[in-house]
Image (cartoon, rainbow, N blue to C red):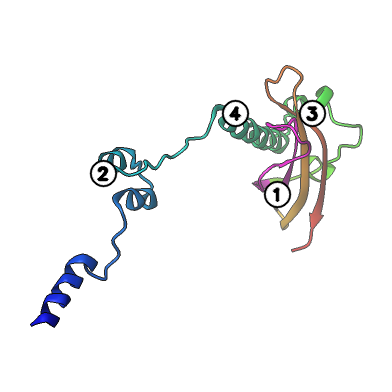
Amino acid sequence: MRSIAWLTLILLQGGCSCDRRPDAQIAAVAGTPAQGNATAAGQNPVTQTAPGPSEIEQTNGVSASVSTVHAYVAAVAAKDWAKADAYWSGGKPSPQPDDFAVRGIEDLRSLRIDNESPKSLDSESPPHSVEIPVTLRIRKDNGAYEIRGWYRLRRKIGGDGWEITSASLQPSIS
């Protein structure tokens, strides 16, 4: 009889063997704020931090550099040279453009640009200059090929956008 009493006491105190985490931990794992539940239960509240203004500004600023490269390549594909040249620092590329492999394409049927995440070229936050690795998939009348390389951009002096400073793109054999 004594062993049954001990067994009952152990089961009541130990509970079952299933996973029983405090409500705050369950909510944190699920990704929902648990501050209200944890405070009501007398536990330490779990707080989640939202990105600060500088993090949002950095993300938006760097994504704008990618948009600049995409807009430039679209202008080149359309052979709108005035618009394309305006994306370069100083309003025009060098006499022999660093991305001549792209600018010199004739009989273009389609073009697809894939880019990797921009890489900061300085230690500023947000960065003032970035390098964006790209792969361009070109389809012409006589076949398809890829051009791989990068574009380097810096913030415009007024901080209102990005301008291309250099590029290195070469056709690749795939």
Q: Nearer the viewer, residue 161 or 29?
A: 29
Q: Secondary structure at mark 4?
A: helix
Label 2 environment density (alpha carbons within 10 Å; few <14, some 14–19, many ≥20): few
Marks 1 and 3, the one that precedes in the sequence: 3
At mark 1, the secondary structure is strand
Residue ID at (22%, 69%): 16
- Name the front one of labels 1 and 4: 4
Look at discs 4 and 3 and give the one toward the viewer. 4
Query: How far is mark 2 from mark 1, CA to CA?
Result: 56 Å
Depicted 77 relative to depicted 24: above or below: above
Residue situated in front as seen by the camera: 9 or 131: 9
Spot occupied by residue 96 in the image (x, y as percentages of width and height): 91, 37
Q: In front: 109, or 154?
A: 154
Give the SS element for disc 3. Answer: loop
Which residue lies under the disc numbered 2?
41
| Residue identified by numbered label 4 | 54
Q: Which mark is on residue 136? A: 1
- Give the Cα separation between the discs numbered 1 and 4: 32 Å
Quadrant where the N terminus is found in the figure? bottom left
Residue drawn where x is 68% and y is 32% of the image: 68
Q: In which quadrant of the rendered view does residue 86 lie?
A: top right
Residue bounds of the magenta highlight: 109-137
Q: CA distance from mark 4 to mark 2?
A: 35 Å
Question: How would you rate the neighbour count of disc 1 (Cα within 10 Å): few for under 14, some for 14-19, many for 20 or more?
Answer: many
Q: Say which of marks 2 and 1 sits in front.
A: 2
Mark 1 residue type: Leu
Question: Which residue appears at 52% of the width and 34% of the height?
Answer: 51
Residue that numbered label 3 is attached to:
88
Crowding at mark 3 (Cα within 10 Å: few <14, some 14-19, many 20+) = some
- N-terminal of the pair, mark 2 or mark 1, is 2
In three-dimensional space, the C-alpha distance between marks 4 and 3, rounded to whole angstroms, equals 27 Å
